[in-house]
Amino acid sequence: MLSAPGSRLLMEQGLAVAKTPQDPAIAHVTDLWRGGLGPGTDEWLHHHGWATRSTSLAEVGEAYGRPLPEGFGRAWGFIEAVRLAG
């Protein structure tokens, strides 16, 4: 990788695009989606020299005192990664 040690990467983690419900009214936009970060992104980064931390959307809501309904927001969230030295 060409990222310098200490580089930071922040990204949203969601469900695979293939699982997104199709809506004909917005198909002209959603048909442009070609993928994205699917399950296992944090493991892939870890194996390529990054330290990662994942935070679910439910955890973010709880931290702001805005809990989400039970079972909601556990599959979505954020990944923070920091490039390790050499």
Image (cartoon, rainbow, N blue to C red):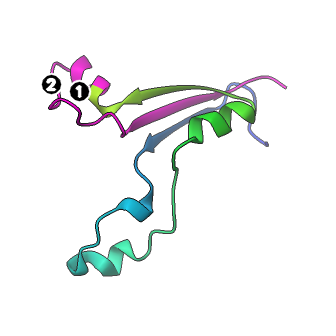
* Residue lying at 44% horizontally and 43% vertically, measured from the top left: 13
Q: Amino acid at mark 2?
A: Arg
The N terminus - image quarter: top right
Q: Residues within 10 Å of mark 2 (few under 14, many from 20)?
A: few
- Residue 15, horizontal then vertical, whole percent: 40, 50
Q: CA distance from mark 1 to mark 2?
A: 5 Å
Q: Are marks 1 and 2 in contact (CB under 8 Å)?
A: yes
Q: Is residue 52 inside the magenta stretch?
A: no
Residue at which label 2 appears: 66
- Decide which of tag 1 and tag 2 comes sooner along the chain: 1
* Residue lying at 36% horizontally and 40% vertically, measured from the top left: 76
Q: Under tag 1, what secondary structure?
A: helix
Residue at which label 1 appears: 61
The quadrant where residue 42 appears: top right
In the drawing, does residue 45 fall left or right of residue 37? right
* Residue lying at 75% horizontally and 36% vertically, measured from the top left: 48
Task: Give the answer, above or below, for where 41 lies relative to 25.
Answer: above
* Residue lying at 75% horizontally and 30% vertically, measured from the top left: 49
- Residue 75, horizontal then vertical, whole percent: 36, 39
In the drawing, does residue 41 fall left or right of residue 68? right
Task: Give the answer, above or below, for where 55 lies relative to 77.
Answer: above
Q: Under tag 2, what secondary structure?
A: loop
Q: Which residues are magenta?
A: 59-86
In the drawing, does residue 86 fall left or right of residue 16? right
The foreground one among 10 and 52 is 52
The C terminus - image quarter: top right
